[in-house]
Image (cartoon, grey):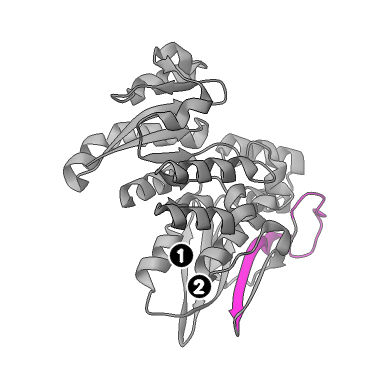
Amino acid sequence: MKVKIALLGLGQVGKAVLGILASNRDHYAQKLGSNIEVVVAADFHHMLHAPDGIDLQRLLYYKEKGDIWGSGYAEIDRESLFDRDFDVLVDLMPATSDGLRARDLYISAFKSSRHVVTACKSGLANSWAEIMGSAASSGKRILYEATVAGGVPFFSFIRQCIRSSVVTRIVGQVNSAANFVLLKMAEGTSFEHAIEDAGKLGILEANYHFDTLGYDSAWKTVITANSVFGGTLKAGDIRFEGVEGIDPDRPGLKNTRLLADIGSESGNLEASSTLRELEPSDPLASLKGTGLGFTVYMKGRAPLTVLEFKDGPIETATAVINDLLLL
């Protein structure tokens, strides 16, 4: 089965997607029967189109050189995107604070009979009801595993592995950058140097204040709440905080984490993204540096924890590609 995609965003995650698709092309075709073809690729400067497919290694080469236009593929106007022949829109572009770019893009994709795979949080966090309503009325799907926990297969875990259980609460470390900064500061590193170190690891948003002021974690909290508990929350509906201005001498800083906390009691959905000190025995306390994970509490059974001890562009890219293969 051939799936043609339009890949928007060639930052660190986008480049990782290209690299994985190029390396695993034969595996996906032979083992899974899926041939994923990139026919549109765009970065901040150019949108390129090749109806018979773009050579991914060639595109990567010119992206690393600094200008994908040199790859020789036809440049198209962004307004003509949906005039092209493709099946899935893949959004890996940087988040905007209001999410309107993503909302309008996804609704346009659904109306033109395309599915959406996204790693961008702000659209879903600010316009969940509108986006999901448009997808449903158009008979199309939006998959968003990569929006919340990098390569952790969290939504797949919820949908496939614990369908027989009633989830009552979820606590998660969903932003690696902010928690990495906290841990570095607990070790004596300044906030500024911790940010530099996080940037080298590729775990910061294009605007790192989205991470350190708590917006990214709040967006992920809202997406998780809406997806798992059927809510219609927006980012402005929840209490959240960040790590900028935190006292480096704060007691218990070594075990302090920025955590999503979501629960449903008697049909009332509550969600927050705040700083709290974990007990050393808490499974989430074992996450160091750039790890991500969730503990899921369920009615009548012991909680389960899903962890990923490293988060980065490669891990996020694997979640994007897994969503493509699910489609």
- Identify the residue position indicated by label 2 in the image: 296
Q: Is residue 68 above or below residue 243?
A: above
The picture places residue 176, in percent across and down from the top left corner, at 59, 51
Q: Is residue 205 above or below residue 239?
A: above
Image quarter of residue 186: bottom right
Q: Which residues are magenta?
A: 242-265
Pair 2/1: label in front = 2
Q: Which mark is residue 291?
A: none
Observer-nearest of 162 and 108:
108
Q: Amino acid at mark 1?
A: Val
First in sequence: mark 2 or mark 1? 2
Residue 101, position as x, y percentages in the image: 61, 40
- The secondary structure type at the circle numbered 1 is strand
Circle 1 residue: 306
The residue at the point 56 percent across, 21 percent down is: 45
Residue at position x 41%, y 28% in the image: 40
Q: Nearer the viewer, residue 196 or 227?
A: 227
Q: Is residue 30 above or below residue 323?
A: above
